[in-house]
Every structure is written in structure tokens, then in C-alpha cells.
Amino acid sequence: MSKNAPLLSALFLLLWCNVLAAGDSYLTNSLQPVFDKDGNASRGAWVNGANGGSAKRVKGTNIISMTLNKREQMARIAFHEHMPFDASLATDDPTSALQVKVRSKANYTGNITWGWHIKDNKYIRAPASQINLTANTWQELLLPMTPAFKCENAIAIFFELDTPGTLEMNHVAVVSKRRLCLDAIPADIFLNADSLKLNGKAVAGINTVELTGKPLMMTEQRRCLRARLMLLTVNSR
Amino acid sequence: MLTCKVNVVDGEFSMTFRKDELAQYANNVFVASASGSAGKPEDSSLPVDTFVYPILTGKSLPKLFIENGKLYQATAGGGKKPFGFVGMNYTQFMLYFGRKESFELIAREVDQLASWGITAVRLPINFALLQPAEGVFPDNPDYEKILKEHNIYTSWFRMVEYFITLAGQRGIYSVFDWHGYPVDPYRHFIGGDIHAKGSGKPGEGIAWLAPTKIAAVEFDITDPRHYKALLATHTWTAMHFKNNTNIMGIEVPYNEPHTRYMNNQSNWAKVTSACALAIKAQDNDRLTFCMPAGWGHDNLSWTVTWQLPVGVDAQAPHHYLANGPVPTRPEAKSTKRPWLCRDQDLTFARAIATLSLPRGAGNVPIYNGEGGEWGSDIFLPDMERGLANDCMFEASLVQGYAAGLIGHMNWICFDNKSYDKTIYKDHGPRFAKVYAEGPVDWSKADVAFIQNPEGVDSDNNHNMSVIPFIDLMLSLHMGPVHYLTDDEIIFKGVSRQSSGLEQVTDASASIGDYKCLIVDKRNLDRRVEKILKKLNIPIFMFEKPEELTTAVAVKLFTDNGVYIDQKTPEGIQLAIGPKHVVVFRRKGESGTDTIYPNVKRDGVFELVDEKGKSCFKGTSEDLRNNGVSITLDKWRSLILEIKN
């Protein structure tokens, strides 16, 4: 086997997986975008600063710029009141993470904290993460999740810095870190086809995979259908 | 659950799943796990799922046809069996799928309908979606482009065809009903925006029959362009679905023709016949079911009772339980829909029977095209909604069956997510097996009731004169009787013969083989009495309804060998079908009673209750003499299967 094989397969994964390699041993799947790489604000989100912090979307770009000079200052991405962030997606299991792409015009070292803003002005923070940015270089972060919150949906996501700085940010999403993944199945694949070729990827070191297929429980069936019909409703507006 | 092992090659793996290995009509979820892993979450993929559509087998339903006034389903080897159904209005093609596309929802709902025992659906359709421009139908190259211009999913007709195919595969026949028209530029379901109405902004809906894009008009059959559009719709549909045996028929002329023009017999018959013949010209075997005038519930006119227009095969009136020929309650005027605020006891006691008896002496098949629990909030306001709906659905099924209907199409706006559909899960399968054996046979009767349908004034397009006959029939458990109007007697009973040169004299023709007749003389055509006297059939005639006492009727019937049952309590209704006895407590209190159904069988047979328990074994005479004990709640039914 070629010495370059692992490198080539990693490149292959990046090109074909529709997921992003995070480190050497994980693949990530987007569970819910918050502010995507094209600058689309999920759930009707808008960007603002709070407690004296400044944050805004850079006009004509897909980038959020934030300047936070004190610990209590925040950059926020708020959700539309009719489309709050579903609390059930914000789990604290070890496979979940917040994926963020950041850069700074100057080298930057400090701790970043993020969290959810929920009803009654409550804030749920994730553990702080140290970041070391090289000037003008995008870096992808996988930040640990907050403690799970239940019952209340989030009305905004926020970021704080313990060291003053101006950061740019893009591609914010709640992701799942896994060692293998399955490609999404095109909608209605079985309407006209009698079989389905299911494709997946695995990190190096996994040589055999067990695949299982089974019907969802009835309550889940209803949830899936509701979600799809809701999507239809949104799209047809 | 399917499990398989696959190898990872260069970081990738794949596996092919066949549809027939997976659970159809359901979302199937797939997960990949690293072999030999310790079960850590990161060693499994996130699940992905997809809806697995059913395999289309290409199998169609047996052809339905009518012979001697009865609906049959073809069987193997050129045979036939009577056909009847519990059905449902499936409104999604009118109120949903134009603006939404979901084949998955169709598949799931066909599965749901089948699970309720439904074997026929009425498809109410706004024909704007089928004919979005004058003369343009789905086989026209411009069809999809026009739909798109009006914000309608171009797959709409493909969804209709998919439904019909899949429903057929699941044993469900489809009937077309033209329920809406291209007349309102602001109607949401045909591409418009209701909020723009009145703004002066042109509507974007398919409304090519409206003279402008800023105002809706009523569908007007007197307008030649509207008439042509309707006929073209019938013609194209009959042509396109020619020989498709999944289609039970097409309703004519269109849904609930209630304009003043169409409430005239001559106009209604002319239009209805033209529509039926347009269909027959394309497919002579395609069954046509007529929709009476009014709100589909006219049971007075001879054209919708005993003399249907040329080209029409059968009837499909609308009989809503809550809107029967029953007086309204005192508080009716203070309710939102007073016509549904009717006497509850009388409604359960005889509403559907009263609506159905004047519909002819069993000479054509009849199904109730719309009915059921609609209006329960007004009709039974003090009852918990689910319970009220349940009672009304059950009563509609049992009373319709007893009246000899071949089927019942329940009305429901299908997309109403908040509507509790559990009532269908219970009563649908219960009655599906009863209806499936064919209707109670009303084609022969020992007694005919004869009257002028305006013996007392009609009301709400309903025959009110018939009520004394209904009370008699139900209280004596008479089973099929015939109702003949004086017009019908003259039409069928009079003949004339030439006698000598240029001389014609009256003669009589047969009106049927009856053991006796009861004749209401109120407003009766004078010729009828003369005709009847020539028939040599025992007759009781009355001038005032109070003369028709039970004692008088019982004497007439017993003297002439007509079977009556005075032992079964009056509050119990018995419907004796080909293989079932359906028992309904139409009035009185819940409790235990003995019933004496007149089940005609040679030799010994059994009656088996719904739990499979045998509750009677013996001959017809044993049952008539000794009866069978039942326990039944008020306004509830039970079904006994007749087993030889």
C-alpha cells in the first residue's frame, strides 16, 4: 500500500463525506446549524452584542465580527421567537459539540465560553475552552456542550471571552462527533426505487461495520411525519 | 430488524437494502456500528432514516357492475358477489395536495384507511386542478406549466393517480366528486391568497371561469362556458380512467347542486343526464352515481327517487344524521347552525330511515355520499365530543345499513390534525365486514305504502309525509317495505289499450307483487284510487294519519300473511342482512331485552356475537318463537353473525 494512502483517504473523506474531519479520529455530522458557512442565519437568527459587547454581521459577507473587551460582554445570535432552538438537540452527551470556525486579525490566546440564553433571562454556560489563534487563519473549534436544559427552548446563543479581542466567526453548528457516519438518504428514495444503497464512512482503524435497519416506533413515525410536513409548510409559504 | 456486516474499504462502506426486506408504510432507521466496539456512542453512526413506500404490485380491484338494480363485484371465473362498503371522503386532493406535496402522506393515509376497514373513498376535487385552463388536462403539454404559474405543485395529478393505484392495491375503490371549480382567484387551495381578497390586487388562483381576477363568482351551470367546463371534466376523466377497475364510479352532475336553477327537476335531470351520458360516451361501463339537488338530500323529486335521468346508474345522496326530517329544538335559533340543532331522540329513532324510504323501492343501489358525525357540536352539545362523534358515526352506519344502502361515505376534513379519528378504528372494521356481504335486500317487499309526497308540506327538501309509515315500519320490525308515490303509481300502474278504431281505454299494469297496500289519501292524485282498485290487492286507505293505528295495521298485515314482530321491543331496530343481524337501540333506555329477528334460513343456524360467542342455535322458527337475549346501551349497536 502506498505510504500516502492514509493521507489520500483523509482527503477523500473531506471531499466526499459531506462532513468535516475534526482531529484524527472523529467525523462530525451537523445536527443543527446556527449560523451556517454561507452566512445563512438559521431559525431567523440575527446578530447583536449585549452588556456592552459589539457583534454584527459584516455587510456583504458570511462573517460575524465581534469585539468583546470585558468578561461580561457578549456576542449573541438570537432566534426568531417562532423558531426557538429545540432544547432536545442541546444534549450534553460526549458525542455532541458546538462547532465554530473562528479567526483573528492578530494572534490571540484566551478562553472562550459559549452558552444558551433561555426564557426569564437565564443563561446556561458550557465549560470555557482555551483557544490559540494564528493571525488571519481560520480555525475550526469543537467546543464542549453546555449542561442539557429541558423544557425551555433557547432564544439565543452567546459567546464570551476572558481576554479582550476581536474575533470573526462563521459556521456555527451543533454537531455530533462520531467515528463513523452514514450519508443522508435522499428524500422519497423508495417512491420509485425498489432498493437503497446506503453509504457510510469510518475513521482509520475501523475495518468492519455492522449495519442495522428497523422500523421506527409509532411515536417516532408520527414525529418524523410531522417534521416533514412542517418543512413543507415552511417551504410553501 | 435487519442486521448485516460489511467491510470498510479505504474509509468507506456501503450496503444495499431491498424494499421487501424492510417495513413498508413506515420510516426505517439505519445505524452503523464498528464491529466489536464496546458500545460507546461515538462508535455508532448517527441514525439516518427514510420512509419505505409500499411495493406497487400492479394488482387492480375486481370490476364493479350493476345488474337488476344491485351492485356486484366480479369474481374469478366470471362470477359475481354483492358489494357494499364502509367509505370515507378523502378531502386531501381538494384541501391539501395542491399546495403541498407528500406522497408519503398519501401512502400513510391509505394504510390508515385500510386499517379502518374502508373499501371505498369519495375523492372531492376542485376541478380547477384537473382543468387549470379551458380544455387543458393533465395529458396536455402545458398542464404542469399552468399549475406552476398558479403556485400549485405540478405533481398534483401524479399524486391522484398514485393514490388510486395504491388504494386499489389495498382493496379501496375510488369515486370522483367535482366539489369545487375555477371560480375564485383568491382561494388558497387553487393557488390564490385569501388575504389579498378585497385588496384590489389580482388573485393568482386558477379561476378561468371568473370574468376577472379580482372577484370570485359562483359556479353557474346556466353559463354555457361553465356547463362546457363541467362536461369536459367528466369526459376527460372517463376517457383517462377508462377500464380502470380501481375506480368505482363518477358522481354526476357535481357536488350538492343547490342553486335555484338546479333545484328544478327539469333542469337538474337535463344537466345530470348530460353529464352521465358524457361519461358513458367515453366508457359505457363506467358507473355514474347521481347527486340530488338541494344540499344533496332532496328525497321528494321523482327524478332522484324512482325515475333517475338517462345515463345514471345509481344514487349518492347526502344524508347527515343531524340534518334529518326531524323538528328542531327550541334553542335552535340561538345556535350557529340551527338546522343541526334537531330533536336528539327522534333523530336516533328514525332520521336515516325517514330520509331513505322515499328513495325508491330498491330499484337502484344507493350510498350515502356524505354523512356521519358532522355537526355533533350543535346536535349533541352536552355530550363529550369524542363520545358524540362516536355515537353519530355508529348510528349513521347502522341506520344506513338497515335502510338498504350499499355504503356510507363518512364526511371529514381529512387534514384536521386535531380531529380524533379513533372512532373509525372501532366502528369501521365492525361494519366493514357487515357491509362487505352486500346490503339488506329492499328489492322485494310484502307491503307498499302509497301517498303523495306533499300529503303534508315538505320541509328542507325533505319528505315529511312519510313519517307515519316509518313509525309503523320500525315499531313492527317490518323489514323491507316499499314506498310508492302517486306519480309513480300512475307512471307504472297505468296502461292504455286500443279498443276499436280511434278508441283508447284505460287498463292497468302491475305495480309489484304485494300482499297488501296502505294508502294515504291526503293530496293523492284522483286517478290512483281507480288504478289500485283494479289491482286486486287488499288495501287500507286513510284520510287522516290518526286513522292508521297500529291495531288497524296489525290486523291488515296478519290477515294477509305479512310477517310482523310485536315481541321485540319497539325501541330496538333490527336489520337483517345476507350474513348478519345488526341490532340498534334507537330509543329507550339501556338494558337487556329479548329480540326475535326474522332470519330466513333452511335448517339449523347459529348467531354469533362480536366476541365470537354463540348466542343462539336453532331454526328460523325457534328464533321467531324464543328469541335471543341481548344487552345494549342507548343509541348503540351490536352485530350478530349468522352462521349456517
Image (cartoon, coloured by chain):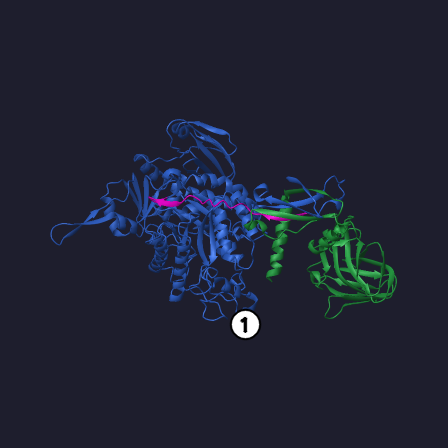
Chain colours: A green, B blue
The residue under label 1 is B201
Disc 1 element: loop
Relative vertical location of residue B141 with respect to residue B377 in this rendering, above or below: below
Q: Residue at x 88, y 62 (%)?
A: A163
Q: Identify which residue, A111 or B500, lies in the foreground.
A: A111
Q: Where is residue B5 in the image (x, y as percent from the top left)?
A: 67, 40
Label 1 CA crowd tier, 10 Å (few <14, some 14–19, many 20+): few
Q: In this view, does B530 lie above or below A234?
A: above
Relative image position of residue A52 (x, y in whole percent): 83, 67
> Is B268 displayed left or right of B122 in the figure?
left
Q: Per the image, is B465 magenta?
A: no
* Residue at the spot 69% in from the left edge and 54% down from the top edge: A16
Image coords of residue A101 (percent x, y): 78, 60
Q: Does the magenta stretch include residue B59?
A: yes
Q: Mark 1 lies on which chain?
A: B
Up/down of B211 relative to B80, above or below: below
Start and end of the magenta stretch? Answer: B47-70
Quarter assignment of residue B39? top right
Can you see residue A91?
no
On the question of residue B395 being in view, the answer is: yes
Quadrant where the N terminus of chain B lies?
A: top right
Q: In which quarter of the image is residue A112?
A: bottom right
Q: Is residue A23 above or below residue B567?
A: below
Q: What amino acid is found at the position of numbered circle 1 in the picture?
A: Lys
Q: Quadrant of the C terminus of chain B?
A: top left
